[in-house]
Amino acid sequence: MTNTAPIDLRSDTVTRPDEQMSAAMAAAEVGDDVLDHDPTMRALEERAAQLLGTTAALWVPSGTMGNLIALMLHLKRGDRFLAPRGSHVLHHELGSAAWLAGGMPDPLEWSAGPTLLCLENTHNSAGGTVIPLHEHAQLAAAARDSGLRVHLDGARVWNASVALGVPPAALTVGVDTVQACLSKGLGAPVGSVVAGSDDFVREARRVRKMLGGGVRQGGVLAAAGLVALDRIDALAEDHENARALAAGLAEIGWEVTRPQTNIVLAAVPDVRLTLERLDVAGVRAVPMSGQVRFVTHRDVSTADIKEALHRISEARI
Ligand SMILES: Cc1ncc(COP(=O)(O)O)c(C=O)c1O
């Protein structure tokens, strides 16, 4: 019998904890993280800070909350901040940068008196593109010279580090704060970290509590995060699968981007119709930047990618 289960390429957030991760969660040593810190949370935060090259880090339930906390601490009401066109903080966080952090967003060009530059690496809506090291250094230096602080939305900074073959800490040089997701390609069911100086993280802990993001026996979730952080190198397989998907789609006539990481964007005449037809064929994707977005992740294998291409080809989408 042929397997007709849908192949889910909507996002790298659809990954489910595997046996090893579930076992680590079940066995986690826990405390009360809001009262006086949870030991597994502490271990995760120390490890994340070390990987990201910061002095401290704080677990937060989501990337959105990590970015929000950083923006709340960097911005005063009415401050302008710069972020790349199409960035997640500008378009996909429901205006929280303005509503809750009080910041006035400006797409990256130039504007009077901004106080913060918010980078995104990899850049989701541009198709998982990577900011190369020299460009990152130039941006961070230009920000510094203009007296701007720098926050990095590094939801997929792990993918950028694998694509460039450098440690994640190389991508945070010159930034004040960074947010990095555990729940995307690394496969944790929940969680991100927001990292920076000791002072920043002390304040961030206070703001997290204010936002209702403190969790008590958080070690259960941090244990998943620790397993996730062991899986950074495995992201190379997702990147390989994205390249195979893009090559296969191009072969059957699709207009696709050349993926730098785990995201493939395809330009199609009618996005909604294409997504419907993909869904009927058993391949799931989402709209992004007026195109169709496919994301590879640890729950789709190379064989699944071949099967997805077979289904798309058979259905003549
Ligand atoms: C670049 C980027 N930043 C932040 C986020 C927010 O992460 P979360 O969904 O955990 O809130 C996402 C989620 O897709 C993202 O792609």
Image (spheres, rainbow, N blue to C red):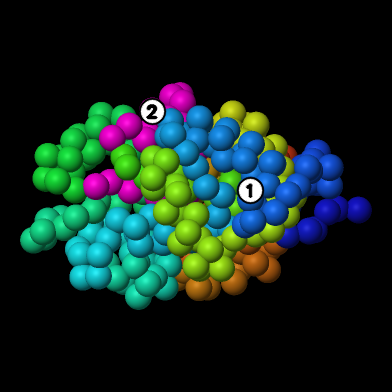
Quadrant in which the C terminus appears: bottom right
5 drawn magenta: no
Q: Residue furthest front?
A: 36
At label 2, the amino acid type is: Ala
Left/right placement of residue 142 relative to residue 310 reads left
- Name the spot of residue 202 as percent of width and height, x first: 45, 49
Left/right placement of residue 294 relative to residue 198 reads right
- Name the spot of residue 110 as percent of width and height, x first: 12, 56
Query: Which label belongs to residue 37?
Result: 1
Element marked by disc 2: helix
Element marked by disc 1: loop
**Cα–Cα gap, marks 2 and 1:** 29 Å
At label 1, the amino acid type is: His
**Residue nearer the viewer, 264 or 161:** 161
Q: Nearer the viewer, mark 2 or mark 1?
A: 1
Above or below: residue 219 compared with residue 166: below
State the extent of the magenta-drawn residues as a range: 149-174
Q: Which residue is mark 2?
A: 170
Left/right placement of residue 161 relative to residue 5 reads left
Above or below: residue 145 compared with residue 50: below
